[in-house]
Amino acid sequence: MTTLSVPIPQHLEDFINEQVKLGRGANKAAVVRRAIDHLREQEAITSVLNAQREPTLKGKLRNLADKL
């Protein structure tokens, strides 16, 4: 596992410490890892939702290829 040192503002450290106190992570590192995992999941969901908005092609593949 890699260690990453990132400066954060005081209000974020306070929030992380509060999450530890609430039991949402065993320590600060666990809370930050959980937050990054959550961000990664949200990005994946956003990608899927964006892909669903893309126009779709319907019809026989040969007819679609001929149009291109």
Image (tube, rainbow, N blue to C red):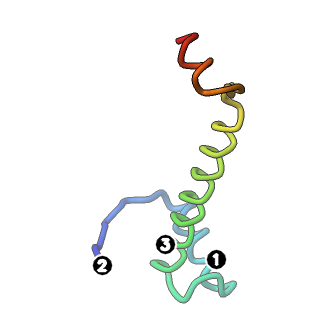
- Residue behind mark 2: 1
| Pointers 2 and 1 in contact (C-beta within 8 Å) | no
Residue 11 horizontal/vertical position (percent): 57, 60
- Residue behind mark 1: 18
Q: Amino acid at mark 2?
A: Met
* Tag 3 secondary structure: helix
State which quadrant residue 20 falls in. Answer: bottom right
Q: Nearer the viewer, residue 54 or 66?
A: 66
Q: Amino acid at mark 3?
A: Arg
* Tag 2 secondary structure: loop
Q: Residue at x 60, y 44 (%)?
A: 47
Quadrant showing the N terminus: bottom left
Q: Residue at x 55, y 72 (%)?
A: 34
Q: Residue at x 59, y 59 (%)?
A: 41
Q: Is residue 53 left or right of residue 29?
A: right
CA separation in Å, label 2 and label 3: 12 Å
- Residue behind mark 3: 33
Q: Is residue 8 above or below residue 46?
A: below
Residue 52 horizontal/vertical position (percent): 70, 38
First reached walking from the N terminus: tag 2 or tag 1: 2
